[in-house]
Image: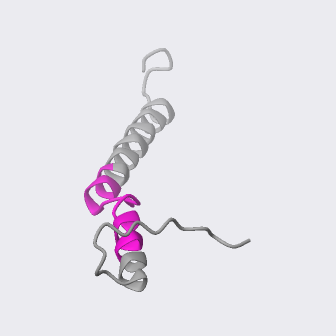
Amino acid sequence: MAKVEEIRCEDSRASPINQIAYNKKKQNKRNHGSTEFFVFVDYLFLAIFFAFLCFIAFKILFASDSFSL
């Protein structure tokens, strides 16, 4: 399906091709992907979770007293 784009010619001297390129550039700024910092934070939380999970599992498996955690 064809994509319909509105051409706003605020400057009468601007060509339609330049105006379409300007509108596309403006639209691209709205699409933000995940930044490296947030990806790092996600992996950090996953690592902390799995470390805690392993800690609990080893604590249960290798407990010297069967009633203690």
Q: The N terminus appears in which quarter of the rendering? A: bottom right
Q: The C terminus appears in which quarter of the rendering? A: top left
Q: Does residue 66 appear to the left or right of 42 in the view shown?
A: right
The percent position of residue 42, horizontal first and vertical second, equals 36, 50
Q: Is residue 20 above or below residue 45?
A: below
Instruction: Residue at 31%, 80% (x, y): give it.
Output: 14
Q: Quadrant of residue 59?
A: top left
The percent position of residue 64, horizontal first and vertical second, equals 42, 27
Q: Is residue 64 above or below residue 32?
A: above
Instruction: Residue at 39%, 61% (x, y): give it.
Output: 33
The percent position of residue 47, horizontal first and vertical second, equals 36, 50
Q: Does residue 13 appear to the left or right of 43 in the view shown?
A: left
Per the picture, the main secondary structure of the magenta-coloured stretch is helix
Residue bounds of the magenta highlight:
22-41
Instruction: Residue at 28%, 81% (x, y): give it.
Output: 13
The percent position of residue 5, horizontal first and vertical second, equals 54, 68
Q: In terms of depth relative to the viewer, which is nearer, 38 or 69?
A: 38
